[in-house]
Amino acid sequence: MKMNYTELQITTNFTFLRGGSHPEEMVEQALALGYTEIAITDYNTLAGIVRAYTATKGKNIRIIPACRLELLDGHSLLAYPTNKEAYARLSGLLSEGNLRAEKGECYLYKADVYRYAEGMQFILIPPASLNTTFDFEDNFIHSLKEYKQELGDALYLGAIRSYHANDNKKLFRLAQLSKEHQVPFVAMNDVHYHAPLRRELQDVLTCIREKCTIHNAGFKLYQNAERYLKQAEEMLRLFAQYPEAIENTKKIANACQFCLSELKYEYPEEITSEGRTPQEELIFLTWQGANEKFNNVIPEKVKASIAYELEFIERKNYAAYFLTVFDFVKFARGEGILCQGRGSAANSTVCYCLGITSVDPSKFNLLFSRFMSDARDEPPDIDVDFEHERREEVMQYIYQKYGRDRAAIVATVTQQHYKGAVRDVAKAMGLSMDAANSLSSSGWEFTEEWYEGKTISSSGFAAKDKHLLKVLDLTNQYIGFPRQLGQHTGGFIITRGRLSDLCPILNARMEDRTNIEWNKDDIESLGFLKVDVLALGMLTCIRKAFDVCKAHYNLDLTLSNIPQDDAAVYEMICHADTVGVFQIESRAQMSMLPRLKPRCFYDLVIEVAIVRPGPIQGDMVHPYLRRRDGKEKVEFPSKELENILGRTLGVPLFQEQAMEIAIVAAGFTPAEADSLRRSMATFKAKGMVSDFQKKLVGGMMVKGYTEDFAKRVFRQLEGFGSYGFPESHAVSFALLVYVSSWLKCYYPDVFAAAILNSMPMGFYQPAQLISDARKHGVVVKAVDINYSNWDNTLEEKEGKYFVLRLGFRQVQGVCEDDMQILMALRDSRYKIQDSRQEKPNLRIGQLVDAGVTLAALEKLADADCFRSIGLDRRKALWEISALSDHAQGLFAGQLPDTSSEQQITLPEMQLFEHVIEDYRSTTLSLKAHPMSFARGKLKQLKVSTTHELSKCENGLSVRVAGLVLVRQRPGTASGICFITIEDETGTSNLVVFKNLFQQYRKEIVHCRMLMVEGKVQKEGEVIHIVVKKCYDLSGLLLPIGNSEARASEDQSINYMSSAPSVKKVAQTVQQDIFYGGRNFR
Amino acid sequence: MVVIWFPHLVTDRMLRRQPDLKDVAFVLSLTERGRRVVKAVNAIAQSKGINLNMVVADCKALFPDLQVFDFNPEESAKLLNALAEWCIRYTPFISLDAPDALILDASGCTHLWGGEEHYIKHIYNKFNSSGYHIRIAMADTIGAAWGVCRFGKNGSIVKSGFEMEALSLLPAAALRLEPTALDKLDKLGLKTVHSFITMPSTALRRRFGQNLLKRIAQALGSEMEIPDLVIPIVPYQERLPSLEPIRAAEGIEIAIKELLEMLCLRLQKESKGLRKCELICYRMDGVIIKKEIGTSKPSRNTLHLFKLFELKISEIEPDLGIELFVLEASIVEELNSSQDALWTISGGSEIAIAELLDRLAGKSGRQSIHRYLPAEHYWPERSFKDATSLVEKPSTEWRTNLPRPLHILPVPELIDVSVPLPDYPPLLFIYKNVIHNVKKADGPERIEQEWWIEQGQYRDYYCIEDEQGARYWLFRLGDYDSGTAKWFIHGFFA
């Protein structure tokens, strides 16, 4: 039978919380039912059509990109563009609606539709029910007349059989209207899900949308499950009395021949100058840059690779792309914003010459073609990192230069993950908030064994409960649904013509940002190009360090002129002396460094890449280390792999290598290898992964590789999926690693100041960064109202380095504006140049009069910033708190008469109390380490210091104690918990095995000061303590100053019960002051 | 002044009710800003380091076996009030120090217990033996008693004029100060009362505000503090002893009438009406007879209430005679004597209807009277529900956009049909052995099962008219394709 019906109304899950199926599912189901075309009509959005379009590729089905227009002042219309121009108009219409509304809303009016209507077909959606006289309400008939008048023959009337009792009457009335007003009517089925089974999920979505539970949703739900994609035969039967309604679907479908493949991306024109073509411009700029870089003496090898790359770029027509990136980089350089490119194309000689990257490609043996080959037909990939504090400037430059109608950020479709999905579903299913939350946090416990009833989750959920099973079932269906359109972290798309001709634009949640509706996969599958403008904290730090170097050491540093291959820097890295350094500062990295002993730049590249889920999961780390130490012979699984694995001693470490193995050794096509990597990244394609596994392992075994090796390669690929780390990125990161190490090695004062001024970033707290700087001989001085600036600054030289003066930014709770007032007052009172000599005499009262708030002053007093005028924190607070009634208005400047007050002596503060208060107010103390006060007691307990550990022998049983800095349970370590603790002599790393972790969970999770008993495990310089027992010694950190309060508590103990509130005070004190530690990431 | 503090007020009461929790660490929690926060801790949990206002999740991390129950702030307030009323035996002047302490004005009462020490001891032992942890202290001023109660020795008695001495070693918090002032004092190292109490008042006021001075003055007695007293509610109960035992129905009638007069007079004064009322007759032979009536709306209409009791009089067996009648209203609600009935006719008749229903219910039982309200369900059996009271408002409109029969069968009944495929209405159907030929039909209306309540097949409903002109609501269960589809009759249209 010839198919005469086309489904013209399909709502996918890109109409959030309405549609119950993915666009892909709709397409698959339509194909299975024998449809050759369907329309996708989401509410006021085109976000789902690319997914649907991609799903149709290579199959005998096409989609009609369309949209349901929800109007603020009229009945809803379905709009179908018939050609490219009409599509551009539809997209423009939606953009207009989006831009006048908040994010997530689209305000459209009838008048807008009429303006953009040309070339579109429309279907008017009738109301669901009739009135008491079995007719449509007048306002609908009114709308129909008006639409007919404005839209003419493009207007159709929709007809739905929804199995309500009045279907026959409704169709009869529609037929009447259709005849009377000459508006042909069209059959459709208001599809919300691809199969009837999804009704349950769709009901739950309705509940989530309406913020009710399934039990009280009532008539907000649909009455039946008829909104599925029905067979064409069924639709013919339902509309048997009105064959013209079926005919008309074909009429509309035939009129709408527009396909998304007609959209062509064009680069902007502004990127060239002097009338050159993009390719000419690129050639010109590249050689110009090369001459600058190499002082007009370009080595032959470089010349050859430039020529090769330029030829390749010309062949693939990528010149404009490189120029676009160059444009941003040029702007950033002009503004003094540090930037660094990375990605497959970024490590090319061309990019080096253009200054997009500072990694000298001649430093290592990377072939450009390795990243961009003809076979892998994917657009080049350059991500550019900018300083995180100044990236916004670059973004606004892009908007300004190209205009908001031509530049926008790519969307990120955030998907439902287990946690959020189960919470929403559970709430909709009527579970309590508590139950929903504990379900959400115990997702990993719902294993197969749990479903079989063998285990019960820790929160007491058992597989017996049918309602719970239903919740989990619906959750599983819901996972992967698009949740909202966010903005990509920095992917920009820039076009020659109006961007809204291609895709609707919408307001991002952040001010001054606009983005498009499609995400990076969508634009990639349409062949659009994007450039990533990303933010990186370390670049901010490096730039600030460069500025300080210029000011104090008179050095003009850039990323490319730092002396390379400096042995002292590598020596420092080998000793894992890398607190604060980019990337290699984590516990895992630090324990790897002394084993790997990086001695050259490429070693750093490997170091960056090796401590990653990919190589660890693939069990590639240890073979590599053994081979590097010469304990194992370097050999290759086969001759053909020698090329690929040569530079990593036969062990695959990088994503590219794993993919190349798939191609070379398992016979994958490059496209297959790429989709393999992609499928790893998206958990959605669960079924596909095992197919790939069979193919990869099977393919490799056919070619004579061992199964073991093949499986390891696959596991590694799996690891890359969750956090892909290709060599090209590692190379760019390695440069920043080197630069930050160099700064730390030669200018620890500068480095410390810069990193503190760029906080929050990195792995460590200010306390650790400062104690590390002091260990390297930097003198650090406390925040002081007479010397500090907002930022941390360097003062005069003392010893080898400049003195680091902590800035007000370290003080908790003060704002920059207040401190600017303070600094302005200070600078006006004594000239800056001799301020360092003169005895400062800034008085507190003057600060108040200048407009510094009392709250800010109290915070400064808490931070003990008044030492230079002879007041400790208590005295300062005493003075400040007297100023709340200071004179105002006419009498401003008149200081309240505190001098006449009887002199009051406040209780003296002990050093220990000062340290505690320092931690409370600035998270660090220069006066002493809190652990040093407990040392006496710790000695009695036979606790060693971290420093003493380095002299211990392997296997010795020891006790150590310290403040907990980091607790980690990496997914790659099968339940092992790593803890870093710190005492006054340094940090030590603890390893807690899974069963012990369960046993000492309370101590580990909760306490601030941990004492452990365990065995020393030494491997070269790396020391770990394998924990046997844990003790919570937080009590030792109790402020001793509370002794008086304690005395009274002791008294009361004899009689009946003790007073709990005193204890409570003490406990909160110790809990809030010390940093709780970075937890499990 | 005596201050009694219940550090575990709510949990102690729970333990009294559920003694099996004796050895269990548990807390009561309340949701605040989306987090479960501990609002009450029992002594065991406290000894494990769990304190008020901690987040439950943190507590669980600290002590995974912790049991968590819901905290009900109203109940805790009620409990304190009840304890206050109970304490009236110690002194008539009692005030609340919410949420968990009482203040007793013991002036002139202690000698009844043989002096202050015995007084305190008695209270302590009384509460302790009934399972309440308390801390108690006595002083001339509320302030001093409060501070010593919380931070001093339990059971202390501060002698007149020694307030300063008693407080001086206690922490600053003993002065009932707000957290900001306490925080500042703590930072300045002024941790105990004596470290600052002697400072010049100008210096203190400037830094900590007037409140600190006020609290000091209150504690030392230089400023009066007058607490709000608790006045207990007298139960709505009237008693009528009879001189001679009453054995005749007339006598009972008179007694009821008299008691109702007295009770309704009080209800009138307090703008209240009763919903439930019990007559308790104490018989000579010690048997107690209880008769209860209920009303649909709060009422204090003696005539109406008497009519309700009148129906029960025959059930009272006087035997040797009744010597005491007690009438107690167990449920009392607000009833304003408003005049709005002047213009709304329905308002007046509503009372009449309510009174009629009360009488009907008194005769044939409440279960024979039904009132239906619409419920938001598509599934017909669940689309309506029984109303609980006369005034209950429908939570949703009755649906009128789709045909629904006036009379619906509680359970659909199976019928035989002759029906063409696929989804046409039947040509005839047999119900209770009568053949109905279908003349007119409309439908189908498809209604799916509400899957979260019950699994099952959908129904296709048809409105059917037979040759008699009678109309029926029929449905087919499930898909016509299956071949096993069954037909049912579910309702009758008017």
Image (cartoon, coloured by chain):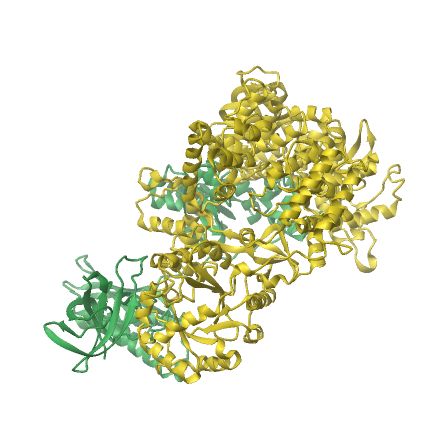
Chain colours: A yellow, B green
Quadrant of the drawing holding the N terminus of chain A: bottom left
Image quadrant assignment for residue A460: top left
Q: Position of residue B5 (x, y in %)?
A: 48, 45
Q: Tell me if A753 is positioned left or right of A83 in this view.
A: right
Q: Is residue A79 above or below residue A372?
A: below
Image quadrant assignment for residue A556: top right
Quadrant of the drawing holding the C terminus of chain A: top right
Total marks shown come to: 0
Q: Tell me if A16 is positioned left or right of A203 in this view.
A: right
Q: Is A1028 in front, or is A113?
A: A113
Q: Is B138 in front, or is A739?
A: A739
Q: Position of residue B204 (x, y in %)?
A: 70, 47
- Asked whether the viewer can see residue A866, the reply is no
Q: Is residue A847 above or below residue A136?
A: above
Q: Position of residue A189 (x, y in %)?
A: 38, 67
Q: Is residue A39 above or below residue A589?
A: below
Q: Position of residue B141 (x, y in %)?
A: 56, 48
Image quadrant assignment for residue A252: bottom left
Q: Is B105 in front, or is B190?
A: B190
Q: Residue at x 33, y 40 (%)?
A: B20
- Asked whether the viewer can see residue A527, the reply is yes
Q: Is A531 in front, or is A1011?
A: A531
Q: Tell me if B317 is positioned left or right of B237 in this view.
A: left
